[in-house]
Image (cartoon, grey):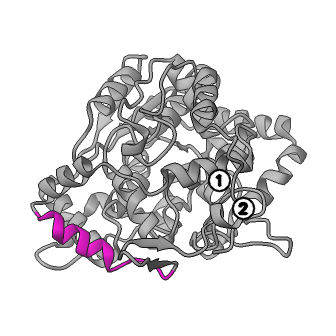
Amino acid sequence: MRYCINCVEPETNPGISFDEKGLCNVCQYYVNKPKVDWDKRMRELKKIAAWAKTKNSSGYDCVIGVSGGKDSTKQALYARDVLGLNCLLVNNPPDVITDAGAYNLENLYNHGFDLIRYSANPVVYKKLVYKALKEYGNPQKPSEYTIAAIPLRIAINFKIPLVIHGENSALEMGEPKEFTTDGDFAGSALGFANSNTVRGGRARDWLGKGIEMKDVLPYQYPSSEEIKSSGVQAIYLGYYLEEFNTFNNAKFAIRNGLMTRTESLYELGRYHRYSALDGNINIINGMIKYIKFGYGSATDKASLDIRVGKITREEGIALVREFDGLCASEFIKGYCGYLGIAVDEFVESVEAYRGKMWKKDGKGHWRLINPIWEQEPPSPSIDIGKVIRRLNAELGIEQDIK
């Protein structure tokens, strides 16, 4: 596989493209970040906040979709304490919530917010997850629809003028431009549902086998006509804040009571414990992505940390080699139990999507073809435990690999 010359993202990422020098589109965005007039963007953000207050007819200035994790904690506290907005938090809980997830949502709520828990029909959701596993090789896909649709639906129905999202994934993770609204790569989030996974937020994508339109209303993103007539606006807070990134948000959230995971990093398939806190499906999906595209959660996080200067590229390669694609068997067994299927059926379903970047070795084990750590072997002197301890020290936590 071909990899970005700056980070560790491969060409198999559906949203990644390279320039003639081999720099990926996300790193190109980061190269230009120092040139951004952040004071100007702050003035724009404050103007938007002031506008929301003047359009307030319900008592609430904004809606924020939250899980209680690092990013939503940053969004909610910043919107209230810095921008002075009266926020209505909306939580769309996962199918099976973890202890950490339940704790973190309550922690954020107890910071002093009004909160709506919007739970889609669990019987319908389970059917959709199974369909998504079989037809897309992505059991997390249905939840992406509700994450996109529910905050905007709440804003329209409650006549709340503004919706605040976190990062613009087109800028931070890479998204094909055809899935954005009018090529919008700025602060507006009205095209949020046009991401690579959701592709328009059409609930009819899930119809069939006993599922009718009335069963999937939470999955339907409001039409452009309805959004326009409502006057509701949506923004990516990360576009306006220079300090907004996963590492800084985690540091901020931990100071404000965030509970991180306690499992071994080898069970999580990543080298940190501050993401995927409310459900285990994200851990499983990292493994599935590794099988489908040849990279997983550790690659995504290493690329982000390289861009913001937390680790070197060589350290990133070592971390990816160590953790990418791993997932505790207990997570898989637990999720299969939730779906009511055998582990063998789950494995067979995922294997159907295995990418062409894999081949079997002489012992019948799948191996990546020419992965980045073979193209650019990291120095044996790199101590990944030391790297992780360094990052954790900055975060203010004491956790090791295991």
| Residue 183 in sight in this render | yes
- In the picture as drawn, the residue positioned furthest to the bottom comes out as 356
Which residue appears at 66% of the width and 32% of the height? 50
Image quadrant for the C terminus? top left
Which amino acid does the dot numbered 1 rest on? Ile
Mark 1 — residue? Answer: 317
Percent position (x, y) of residue 61? Answer: 52, 33
Q: CA distance from mark 1 to mark 2?
A: 8 Å
- Front residue of this view, candidates 122 and 306: 306
Look at the numbered disc 2 and give the secondary structure of its residue: loop
Percent position (x, y) of residue 280? Answer: 31, 46
Q: Judge from the rendering whether residue 251 lies leftward or rightward of residue 20; answer left or right.
A: left
Q: Residues within 10 Å of mark 1 (few under 14, many from 20)?
A: many
- State the extent of the magenta-drawn residues as a range: 341-356
Percent position (x, y) of residue 396? Answer: 57, 18
Mark 2 — residue? Answer: 376
Q: Which mark is residue 99?
A: none
| Residue 54 in sight in this render | no
Which amino acid does the dot numbered 2 rest on? Glu
Image quadrant for the N terminus? bottom right
Q: Which quadrant of the structure image shows residue 131?
A: bottom left
- In the picture as drawn, the residue positioned furthest to the right comes out as 35
- In the image, which is nearer the foreground, mark 1 or mark 2? 2
Q: Is residue 396 above or below residue 160?
A: above
- Front residue of this view, candidates 144 and 187: 144
Percent position (x, y) of residue 321? Answer: 56, 54
Look at the numbered disc 1 and give the secondary structure of its residue: helix
Which residue appears at 48% of the width and 63% of the height? 193
Which residue appears at 52% of the width and 63% of the height? 295
Q: Judge from the rendering whether residue 154 lies leftward or rightward of residue 76; answer left or right.
A: left
